[in-house]
Amino acid sequence: MIWRLTYTSAERGPTGRSGFQFVGMTPGTPSGVVGAVTPYMAYRPPPGAPSAPGPDELVGFPTALTYGRADGYTVLAHCRYTGRDYSGRYGNFLGQAVVATPEEMEGLRPIEFWDSPLWDSPLQDPPLGDSPGSDGPAPEDAAPAVLAPGTAFDPDSLLDRLGGDRAHDRLAAILDAVATVVDAGHGRVVLVAEDTEAVARWIAAVSYSLPAELAADLSFTTYAADLETAPHVIVGTVPSACPEGGFRLDEPFSPNGARPGRFARVITDCWRTGDLDGIDAVGELISETPAPVRDPGGPGRPAGGEVPAPEDTAARSSRSPGRPPDGGVSAPGTAAARNPGPPDQVAAGGVPAPETAAARNPGPPHLPPAGGVSAPEDAARDARRPGRAADGRGSALDGAAALLALCRGDTSVSPGEQSVCARLIRARGVPGWVWPSLRPTLSAVGFDLASALADAIPEAAERCVRLALTDPDVRPRLPRIRLRDGLPEDFRAAMTEAPDLRTLAGLVELAVRVGGAVDAECVAAAAAACARRGDGDVAAAVEATPPLWRKALVHGLVSGLEASPPAVRRAMLTPEACAALGDQDWTLAPRTGGLVLSARADRLTATAALVELEPHGLPDIEDLLGALWAEAPTVPECRWLVERLGPVMRRFAVLRALPRRVFDGVPLDAAEGLRLARLIHDRLPTLAGAARTVLTFERALRAGSEEDVARFLATLRRGEPLHERALAGVARVFAGRSPAARARVLAAAPDGVRDGLLGPWLAAGLDRRGRVDLAEVGARLAEAGVTVAALDAWADGLGRFARRQVESALTDRDPRLAAAWRRARRGA
């Protein structure tokens, strides 16, 4: 629905009162529409204007065409000074308004109403009794209001007018200022000229430069006498109202030194070259309903394999730049929050309008500085406007313009600008014209933009993979990509030239992520090259490689390690690396296999594997076995080796020593030791020296008589393993038996055995009873005619007092033995 309203000072209005009031409006105009329009009905002559102008002077007063949004409506207000009112007082003006819904204004630039015929036919004199703003239905015979834009401004005429001296430089500066305000969500741009038509023309140039949605959201006024209270994005005024600052349209353009932003530069270039399609392209990128690339057969291509080109110029000439065909741009949201206040309200004659600007705009913006853009306000504004990136980190206007520049062959687009392009494409989609234009400059596309285009354009997906190929840091941000034509040609070269195993694993993982087929032989060869040089962490590389390709990687690692220098091989084969390599056929790589096997926690299976590997050229097996068995084996371990390896143990010095070393930490009378000794004696008789000693010890302890004990001990030979331990063990047992039994075993034993038994007895700290027992043993041996030098030396070494004690105690036991002991001492 469209409503028209007329406002002026009348002697008697529709309600019968006099003064400023609505004197005409579309029948049935809702009160909400009247409330939205009222703040716009204001006009104040410029400072210094004639206070009592004549007819010729009235023509020179500026016309104020104001546009904004309020309460969900779009409001166009046209105010011009008329001089005297009904009473003859100066200060009257004629205000007209056209109010429509955003849908009604769709596809139109508000500035097109600058010379609308609507302003030449004001509505007046509604039937008395109809109060303005009544919500009753309109009469059935009332003609509906119709939007009728003017013809003063269109793209073609603006192209001609922008051909003047430095006009394009001025346009770039104004566009940059407007884009800054739009991006920030607050501020204003001031245009200063004596002729408000010049202001309107530059507003038209800005409006046609912006996407349709932004142009519909761009509030402006072609004239305001008081800049402090003007809440619009673009504010036009005259020099007398703005002595300094703003864009001085009547003066030669003088840049302030700051280079305009990307959006302003690109759009200005489009105007300079007459590239209206380029302006449309930027608008399509900003639009919330873009025409994405679609391909029924796969991402990024339509049926037939060609991306449709942009519409031709003839089709575009039927509409303004950026205006969607057939009303295709969705209606933007209300701008009430961004345009909270109306224009000026107080008439020059001092007659107040029904509602003042202060009531609706309590916080006027600051006066703009010389650059034309007002100082930023602290109040936060709505950031989710079409001109801004969704996250507020960059201007979508600049992003869209940067993408167009890139498509036009401008390779100076920075990575930061490309990141804004990428966010814009992810939020809006990919228009169909992008890829045909971007194809020649694809090599200048960075990762962020390539990843945003990857879903729609296969070539961009390949570009994305190429960039990830050379920069591992971007791989975590790689989108889900499935390459249609396989891996890029330089993928194989990258793997072949991988500087280390970590890089190689990353390349394989990248290939798998993008659905590329990796050559297993290439993976193996690259891994072998890294291993030969010692470049990389084996365990980390195996873990990082996708499971499907670990076999190829490990195969290459084993091959390379086998060919590497010994120092390199040992350095790379850490315990973690050995565990990561797992079980392999080490007969093809015995040097590597030997180190891997010797690093296993289970030294039994490692020993067996090393023994099996030895015939295949394993060097230094003794060193490897020695490292495994640096700690003596346990009885169960030795039993396992004897049962598993048997006679093979005789081939290796380290293994030959194990049947002896195992008994070093086992009591000679332990049951498990005896069982192992029997096994060794039966299976490995040539290695059974220690085992025979253990078995002899066991027989001696089980012997029925002292003579048998002596006989078993006599079979022990000096130098055999455990010889001294066995004698000492028997001596400890007999130390608890009677002196008679000890004497009998010594009498029956050869000299070597006697010394072995006596040694522990004599070394023990003897008390009185112990001395008497040894003396009795000596006495009995003396009676039997057996001389034991060590025992006699001990007895002779006793002191006089100790000797008397011994004799006394022996006499108490057996006087005969005491006499024999004394004779032995005298004989000595």
Image: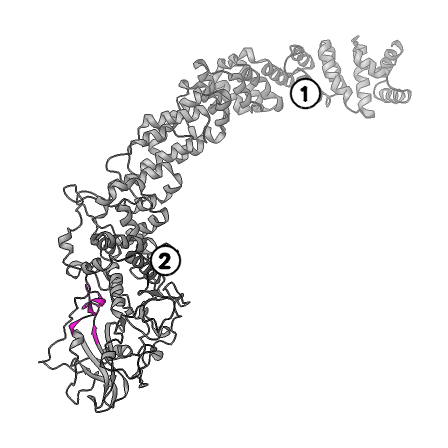
Q: Are marks 1 and 2 in contact (CB under 8 Å)?
A: no
Asked if the stretch drawn in magenta spans residue 103, the answer is yes
Q: Is residue 738 left or right of residue 450?
A: right
Q: Quadrant of residue 558?
A: top left
Q: Is residue 418 magenta?
A: no
> Which mark lies nearer to you, 1 or 2?
2
Identify the mark at residue 631; answer none if there is no mark: none
Which is nearer the N-term, disc 1 or disc 2?
Answer: 2
Specify whether 51 is left or right of 290: right
Residue 660 screen position, x and y as percent? 59, 17
The residue that label 1 is drawn on is 729
Counting from the top left corner in percent of width and height, residue 789 is at 80, 11
Residue in the picture at 40% in, 41% down: 473
Looking at the picture, does residue 547 appear above or below residue 319? Answer: above
Q: Residue at x 62, y 21 (%)?
A: 664
Residue 324 visible in the snapshot:
yes
Query: Of the residues shown, which amino acid type is indicated by label 2?
Result: Pro
**Against 767, is 326 above or below?**
below
Residue under circle 2? 255
Residue 583, position as x, y percentages in the image: 41, 26
Res 148 quadrant in image = bottom left
| Picture layout, residue 792 above or below residue 1 | above
Q: Quadrant of the N terminus?
A: bottom left
Q: Tell me the SS state at disc 2.
A: loop
Q: Nearer the viewer, residue 586 or 353?
A: 353
In the displayed structure image, the side of residue 694 where residue 736 appears, left or right: right
Location of residue 518 by image quarter: top left
Identity of the residue furthest to the left in this view: 141
Magenta residues, as a range?
97-117
Instruction: Answer left or right for 598 relative to 517.
Output: right
Q: Nearer the viewer, residue 811 or 508?
A: 508
